[in-house]
Image (tube, grey):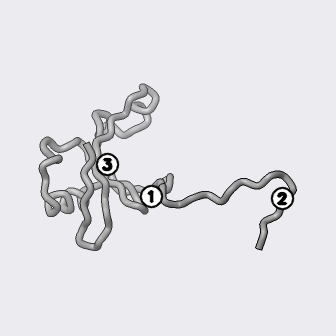
Amino acid sequence: MLLTFTDQSGTSWDVFEVYPTEERTVARVPATFRSGWLCFQSDLERRRLAPIPIGWMQWDVDTLTAALLATHGMPRRTPRQSFDVVPPPRRASGETASV
């Protein structure tokens, strides 16, 4: 389940559950997060809240914002995907761009 909300500063956050799956991954996360966490993700950062609160999917914006303040933050390692950006066309070897 994915929820999206906008906090008081105007930042849009996606919120979803994360569960570590591989034994190696589980061993690398802190004990608090081994049973899963709630991920708050914006364009610039990710935040984690553990354990996953029961009933979080029914929370209102104020409750989600309050939970966001209790999270552990980290910068995003991968940029958000943007599907409205069209890559430039590929050129054949030796072809120059026309101006």
Residue 76, image x and y in percent? 45, 55
Residue 28, image x and y in percent? 43, 36
Q: Earlier in the sequence, mark 1 or mark 2?
A: 1
Q: Nearer the viewer, residue 95 or 15?
A: 95
Instruction: State how far apart marks 1 and 3 are (Cα).
Output: 13 Å
Query: Amino acid under label 1?
Result: Pro
Instruction: State how far apart marks 2 and 3 are (Cα).
Output: 46 Å
Query: Amino acid under label 2?
Result: Glu
19 left or right, relative to 22: left
Q: Earlier in the sequence, mark 1 or mark 3?
A: 3
* Residue on which the image places disc 3: 39
* Residue on which the image places disc 1: 75
97 left or right, relative to 89: right
Q: Earlier in the sequence, mark 2 or mark 3?
A: 3
Q: Secondary structure at mark 2?
A: loop
Q: Nearer the viewer, residue 77 or 97?
A: 97
* Residue on which the image places disc 2: 95
Residue 59, image x and y in percent? 13, 53
Instruction: State how far apart marks 1 and 2 are (Cα).
Output: 40 Å
Residue drawn 23% across and 71% down? 8
Q: Nearer the viewer, residue 79 or 88?
A: 88
| Label 3 crowd (10 A; few <14 / some 14-19 / many >=20) | many
